[in-house]
Image: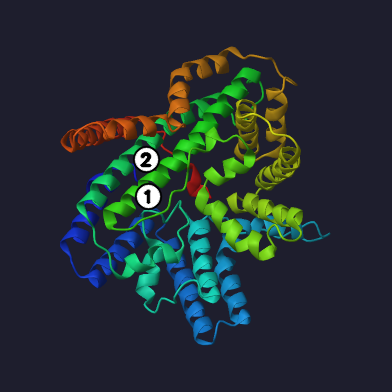
Amino acid sequence: MLFTEPVFMFIFLPLCLILQYLIKNIAARNVILLAMSLVFYAWGEPVYVFLMIGVSLIGWTLTKIMHDKGNKKSLLAVAVVVSLIPLLFFKYGQMILDIVNLIPRVDLHMPELSLPIGISFYSFQILTYVIDVYRGEAKVQKNPLYFMLYISLFPQLIAGPIVRYTEVENELRQRRIKPEMVTNGIYRFMIGMGKKVLLANVVGKVVTDVFANGSAANVGTVGVWGAMLCYTFQIYFDFSGYSDMAIGLGKMLGFTYGENFNYPYISSSIKEFWRRWHISMSTFFRDYIYIPLGGNRKRRIFNMFVVWATTGLWHGAGYNFVLWGLYYFVLLVIEGAILKKVKIPKVITLPITFVLVIIGWVLFYFEDLGECLRALSIMFGMGSAFSDPVSTAIVKSAIPALIVCTVCATPLYATVVNKVKVKVPEVVRTLVMCAFVVVMFVLCTAFTISSTYNPFLYFKF
């Protein structure tokens, strides 16, 4: 079920909110919210919902045994491995078998199975809980239903952000849903929906049209650069829009989620970009891989290599994703060496960083390495005409949308709103917010109903 679907907007969400607001007993509210979350997931994954339930309960059971036995390392290892097995099987099974098939006379294949939606996100949340309990940073949850609710909360279930148990521990036991939380949640939800429907979908359609045959061949240098610029904005507004909607839904239900994006395209370095992009994922790899390996204290370059190779693999079982992760590893190593010796003005580093990020998205977009290299060669004037009339016309038609995306990818809107808010009466602010929500809701609903193009890019990760 998508947040932008009419069945979610007009049936599922209103029913869920009404039940949460009418029922005062926290245990009953949690059970109902758990049931609604499972229905939400089962709507698109009627079989794999049982996989999620099974993995979650096994993770909870093993963690409780580990805690009761005195947090033994052997039990931690078992809990981590068992929690990762479904992820390794579904996401990386064929990739592992391809490596095994390099052995002469070996020819193994995975059965054709779809990737369970959100498996990377809920697997990582189980891992954070297991490890935090072992470290003594989180209390063990004695109620399996409450733990299941933490894992399966529908706002962040299928595409993040990755929520640590300690962030919602208190809210699982007691939460007050205040009116200002609800109004702010609705406002934030509609901002996210606007990002997704009015921006990501519009520029995303351009990408699909330019690469209509799945290849960059015969598109021309202008076409590839234009399409990849559109994809750069599509993936940002798609995922940050989803995160905004998740944060907004959380507020409506009494949960507070951390920010997942902080205007990454205004970064003046690659290091800054990764402090602003997909913050929950970056924090996960820092806290659970980089620091345990030794962080900056020992073998820093090796630790960075492991983290970025893993980051690439997390996004998919394709060599392009590994290459994408290692691309950032190389950039960060080079950047660290240069910036230690030379201080370069932001007016120079900001556009360079943005172009490097666009190039990175080429590695991310083309899962076939041959197509990826072809697109890169065309971007830099090799192997194709500078301009193809059809693709250039498609890109030109997207210029107004790209201008809007550029402005919305900066803090300009938020800065103006915050300055205006302090100068107008609260009544006026409330009326303007209500008008914004209504207009955005009507526009997004109209766009969603009239268009067949409505993918959520991060669902496949």
Q: Position of residue 333 (x, y in %)?
A: 73, 44
Q: Amino acid at mark 1?
A: Ala
Q: Is residue 446 above or below residue 180?
A: above
Q: Residue at x 54, y 53 (%)?
A: 281
Helix, strand or loop for disc 1: helix
Q: Return the x and y of residue 84 as percentages of the image width and height.
A: 58, 66
Q: CA distance from mark 2 to mark 1?
A: 8 Å
User: Mark 2 falls on what kind of element?
Assistant: helix
Q: Amino acid at mark 2?
A: Gly
- What's the residue at 71%, 19% (across, down)? 384
For disc 1, the neighbor class at 10 Å (few under 14, some 14 to 19, many from 20) is many
Left or right: 162 with respect to 77? left
Colouring convention used in this rendered image of the protein:
rainbow
State yes or no: discs 2 and 1 in contact (Cβ < 8 Å).
yes
Residue located farthest toward the bottom when viewing the structure as drawn: 69
Name the side, left or right, on which 73 lies relative to 151.
Answer: right
Residue 83 visible here: yes
In the rendered image, the residue lying farthest to the right is: 104
N-term-proximal mark, 2 vs 1: 2
Residue 112, quarter of the rendered image: bottom right
- Residue 192, disc: 2
Question: 96 and 229: which one is in front?
Answer: 229
- Residue 339 on image: x %, y %: 71, 38
Residue lying at 20% horizontally and 70% vertically, measured from the top left: 25
Q: Nearer the viewer, residue 84 or 344?
A: 344
Residue at horizontal 50 percent and vertical 32 percent from the top: 233
Q: Is residue 146 left or right of residue 56?
A: left
Residue 260 pos. (x, y %): 46, 48
Q: Is residue 181 above or below residue 224?
A: below
Label 1: which residue? 246
Residue 211 visible (yes or no): no
Front residue of 65/178: it is 178
